[in-house]
Structures are given as C-alpha cells and as structure tokens.
Amino acid sequence: MRLTAWYAAIFFVFSIIAFIVTYFLVAAALHEKTDEDLAEDMGEFAAFMHVGGLERVKSEMILETQGREAEQTFFRLWTANGDLLATSDLSAWSGLTVPTEILAQLRSVNEPLLATIKLPQHEYAVRSIYALIGPDIVLEMGESLEENADFMGTLLQGFLMMCTAVFLLGGPIGWFMAKRALRGVQEITRAASAITGDALEKRVSVKSHGDELDNLAHAFNAMLDRIQSLIIGMREMTDNLAHDLRSPLGRIRAAAEITLTNGGSKQDVETIAATTTEECDRLLDMINTTLDIAEAESGAAKLKIVDIDVVELVNDAVELFQPVAEDKAITLSADLPKQSHTQGDLQRLQRALACLLDNALKYTATGGRIALRLSDESKQIKLSIKDTGIGMSTEEIGRIFERFYRCDRSRTEHGNGLGLNLALAFIHAHGGDISVNSTPQQGSIFTVSLPHNQVL
C-alpha cells in the first residue's frame, strides 16, 4: 500500500509539474506570436504610408476596425511631439492616455516599441506597438489579449479536469505498477519461506526480461546453490569425521576394556597408555588439519611472506621423502632449473608439497616412479608431480580435493582424506591452483601453479 501511495503521489505531482511547465511555455509562445503579428501589421502600415501617404493609412485604420474588430483593435496616429492626428473608433477603449514616455523613447530609439496596457474598465489587458511610419508620424496599434486569455483559460480548465482524472486513476495505476514491481520480490519471498521449511532444492524462476529482478533471481539462486552445497558438504564432513573419529576412539576403548579384563598389569597399562597417546595424536592431527583448512579457505590465515627459493624447497622435500621411496623401491627424481624464486609462506608451501608427495608415494606400487619437474615461466611457476600409481577415474578426479573424501581403493591405506584438501587450500591462499590429469592403472600428474615473484 505504501508503494502504491508513493506511485500515485509521484504520478500526480509530476503531472502538475508537467502542466505548469507546459502552461508557461504556451503562454510565452502566445505572447511571442502576438508580438510578431503586431510587428508584421506595423510593417504593412509603414508600406501603406510609403505608397499612399497619411490618407491611405487612415483609410486602412478604418477598414481594420470594422464591426466587432473595433472592440479588439484600435489605432492612433501621433506626431513625435505627442499631438494626436487621427484615431480609429475608440468607443470601446475608454481610459486610453497619451503615451508620452514611449513617444519620447521613439525619438531616440527609432525602432518599434511594445508595451502591455491595463485599462481600468477592461477585463483583458492590451498589447500595443508604437513605431515611426513616416517623418514625424507615429502609429500606435493596440490589440486586446482576450483571445489569448480565453485560450489559456480553456487550457487551465482542461488541466483541472485532467488533474481530477489523474487523482482518481492514480490509486489503481499505482496499485498496478506496485503489483508488477513486487511480483518478482514476492516470488523470491515465497521461495525463501519454503527454504526455511528445509526445501533446499527450491529455486526462483528466472524470466527473460534481463531486468534487476532477473539479476536478483540469478543471485538468489546462486546463493541457494552455494548454501545447499555448503550444507551437503557439512553433512558429508560430519559423516566422514564421525567415521574417522569412531575408529581411534574404538581402539582406545577396546584397549582399556582388555586391560580391565586382564587385571591391568603394568605392561598392559603401559600398552594402553601408548595406544591412547598414538590415537590421541591422530585425533589432534585430524582436528588441527581441519582447522588449518578452514582458516585457509576463509581467508583468515595470516601468511608469513618471505622470499622462497623453490628449487631448494623441492630438493628438501625430495630428500625428506627419499627414505620412504627407497623402502618401497620407488624411483624418486626431480628435474629442476638452476634457480626459481617466489614469495609466500614457506611452512605452508612445505606442507602442501609434502601432502602431494605423500599422496603419490602412497598410491604408487613397489618398483614405480615419481618424477618432479619444475618450470619457471614468465608469470608463474609450475611444479608437476608425475607418478605411475593406480590412477583415478574422471568421477574420482572431480572429488579428490573434497574434505574427508577417500575413494574405495583408498580405504585400505592409512590416512583421513584431508591431505589433498589441505594442499589445495594452502595453494589457493597463495593465489595459485592445482590441476590433475590421471588415467586408471597408469598414473597421475598433479600440477601446482604459483604466481611468479608476486607479493601477496
């Protein structure tokens, strides 16, 4: 209702403003047209004076004021000194005076002068023109503004009728416009109300108008998609977290029950203490990793930016994982340039690279190969990690960076499904990205892209 009232009020106010502007424009145009007609008529009388002299002018004055025209127009002939020479029928023009000031001005200006006269006994004003039409001869011609006033009165009457119509129609028109303007908003409101009832699949229909409401509907649907994705992700994370927490807690509880059942010897107590410590470390590692990922993904992580020699970073990682590779008889090699530098958080980049190498070693069979290749391009640094492991399907590639996701073949391996997600979160925090190419039973290639010498 408020929007309807606003529409009606604005419609009414702007209609009044439009009429006022139109009224004054029309009045100015009529005034200008009247002056042009008077000047044109004065030019004709000057021509009569030139051709036929004063008598021709007098006869034309009489002809121009025949019948009712005597009530609309009058003529007076003056000398430059103010002596009256001749007039038309002035019976309807009582109250006329000698235009002393204007006659004096004509002697110095020597061009037609215009003036508006208000006669005491006349309802309408008179527009007069004064000009020298011959040596020492001044013609005064006056024309009643009655027709102009009648026209403007009719225009004003029409406007008042229009105002009444606008006032009566303003409400329905405002209601119609408000209803159309709010139609899309009401649909979005209904969708939002449905969503509060756990209908996350509900979406707002998008019209093809391309207006602001369509943009709002697109943004609302995108927000719903994001919310639904986050909720699904939270549910999956909760399920996976519960599953991964169940195992260490179950082992701790089982060890405690066995110790209590067997009487609790010193060796048993030491064993359960060691088992509890190990499982608690796993739980703490899982929780800390989850918090690190959340911090990096939210943008709240404060990176300690330093200059990093990427070649040295990769060499250190290869040296760290070399014993693990030798234990599995895996060939671990690195093809590196002489130098490559970037700027970032050294500790987080080390953890990201460690997660990627650990993942490659975990799923590469004995006797396989892992090759690291570092290329320093103009705008970015690329590090590829190629293995001859079990590989992945296209569906698995689309999910491997999800938190707690582990494909079926990964369930037999030690881990919690957080490593790749942590690596991606840290690389994203540095303005980079990780891409994957993989073929089942042939291996995978993980490619890390980092900005080249860019301060974040």
Image: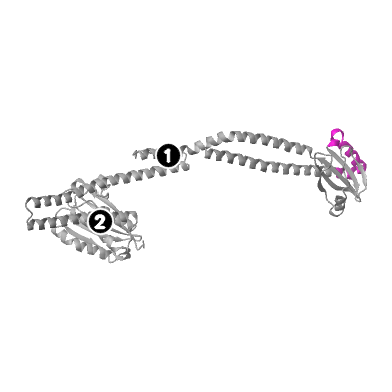
Q: Which mark is residue 43?
A: none
Q: Earlier in the sequence, mark 2 or mark 1?
A: 1
Q: Which residue is mark 2?
A: 288
Relative placement, left or right, of 251 versus 130 is: left
Viewer-nearest residue: 115 or 20: 20
Helix, strand or loop under label 2 = helix
User: Would you identify the image quadrant in which residue 368 lies?
Assistant: bottom left
Residue occupying the point 8% across, 54% down: 264
Disc 2 and disc 1 in contact, CB within 8 angstroms: no
In the image, residue 360 above or below residue 186: below
Magenta run includes residue 53 = yes
User: Crowding near pointer 1: few (<14 within 10 Å), some, many (20+)?
Assistant: few
Viewer-nearest residue: 47 or 322: 322
Expressed as whole percent of the image width and height from the top left, the position of residue 80 reads 90, 50
In the image, residue 171 above or below residue 298: above
Residue 190 visible at all: yes
Residues shaded magenta: 45-71
Q: Which residue is mark 1?
A: 189
How many numbered marks does the figure carry?
Answer: 2
Disc 1 marks a residue whose amino acid type is Thr
Residue occupying the point 24% across, 52% down: 418
